[in-house]
Image (cartoon, helix red, strand yellow):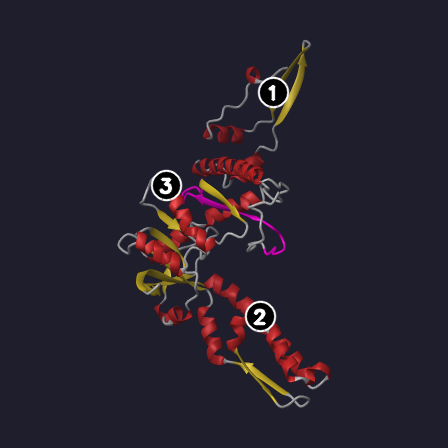
Amino acid sequence: MRSELIRLGYSRDQKKDKKQAVVELNVTAKGGIPLCHRLLPGNASDQKEALKNLETLKKRLKKKDFLIIGDRAMMTKPNLAALLRKKMKFLGPLACKDREFILSFPEEQFQPLAYTSAKGKGGYSGIDTTYSFTHDGRHYTCRAVVVKSEELYEQQRKTLDKQLDKIAKRLDKIKGSLNTRKFKNREYVIGQINKAFEGHGNLRPLFNISLEGENGSLDLSWSYNPEMLEQQHRLLGKYILATSLARATHDANQVLEGYKSRHRVEARFRTTKSTLKIRPVFLQSDDRIRSLVLVNIIALIVYALIEYVCQQEGLAKSAKQALFMFRMPAIVTLTVNGQVVQQIGNIKPFMHDILDALNVKPMELDDMDTG
């Protein structure tokens, strides 16, 4: 039986050779409680499905006034144009980097933002501005906050340095091999230079490369392009948050804070993949695959509710931590006057606190199955 769900597609886990199905999940901003999900074919496009997801939410929630916080896959220009036409509230990073737009703002215009991460890290600054674009011949405008993160800058700078160093070593190796064996051929050398930039084509403008001479007497020279390199460094750690939120109700700091709340949906996906272990999937029938995903989503809802209640009561930071606390109880079986009775042993006070918060009554002796 040929599955309509299990397909090759873009792998978020860098497993391009593995077939997959795609789970679309919506959670609340407060508490990260799963609202609804859809199971899509493994080759489904995030960009195309984003608007369908919005329509599904509107029907199921029977509300028009809600804020959609999405990722780059959602904030393409076609999707952004549709959101603006439908007058829906949205917040998310633009799919396109838009170099020229970011580079148009001098560094001194970035103002410090008060936002700090859950780990207490700050170092954010931003510019509250307006973003304009054209799609299908129509002009659109929305609010945008250009964000700069010092932590992200350092991460991307280190990555860039490694990539540049790798390319530079490859170019030096090609230069050292010139006019020997295959490297006597100009076309072959050009092919090797192109291979040096495989997967990093965006970095090609950062290099000035010159290959002179005829076959057998070639000369290669290269250097960094200082102007393009400076521009690349100015782009590091920066992204554009597009939003419909009004400045009168949400300043730039609140816009950033709202966007950062989307980590809850990512955390729920991590829980599904790790704690609940939804994969690997060995089922072949699409109906059974849908049933498996549904059971996991129900388990995820229970997991999220446990976490939310425990956090509200200050009892545990996560559901995983709360569940870990219950590793100690044991079912004790006793024989009293020939009658077998059972009871839960090793219950600690903090366990009672969690059960009280969840409105769950611990099993008493009379409630136990003594059969």
Distance between the Cα atoms at labels 1 and 2? 61 Å
Image height of 351 relative to 78, above or below: above
Q: Which residue is mark 2?
A: 163
Magenta stretch encompasses residue 317:
no
Rendering coords of residue 294 (x, y %): 52, 37
Image height of 295 relative to 54, above or below: above
For label 1, the crowd category at 10 Å Cα-Cα, with few meaning under 14, some 14 to 19 and many 20 or more, is: some
Amino acid type, callout 2? Gln
Q: Which residue is mark 1?
A: 343
Q: Which residue is mark 3?
A: 59
For label 3, the crowd category at 10 Å Cα-Cα, with few meaning under 14, some 14 to 19 and many 20 or more, is: few
Rendering coords of residue 224 (x, y %): 53, 80
Is residue 114 at all visible to an observer of this figure? no
Q: Nearer the viewer, mark 3 or mark 1?
A: 3
Rendering coords of residue 292 (x, y %): 56, 38
Magenta stretch encompasses residue 19:
yes
Quadrant for the N terminus, please: top right
Is residue 320 at all visible to an observer of this figure? yes
Q: Is residue 183 left or right of residue 70?
A: right
Rendering coords of residue 134 (x, y %): 34, 65
Q: Residue at x 57, y 27 (%)?
A: 347
Amino acid type, callout 1? Gln
Image height of 275 relative to 234, above or below: above
**Range drawn in magenta:** 14-34
Q: Is residue 306 left or right of residue 219?
A: left
Helix, strand, or loop for circle 3? helix
Q: Is residue 16 left or right of residue 239?
A: right
Q: Is residue 197 left or right of residue 133?
A: right
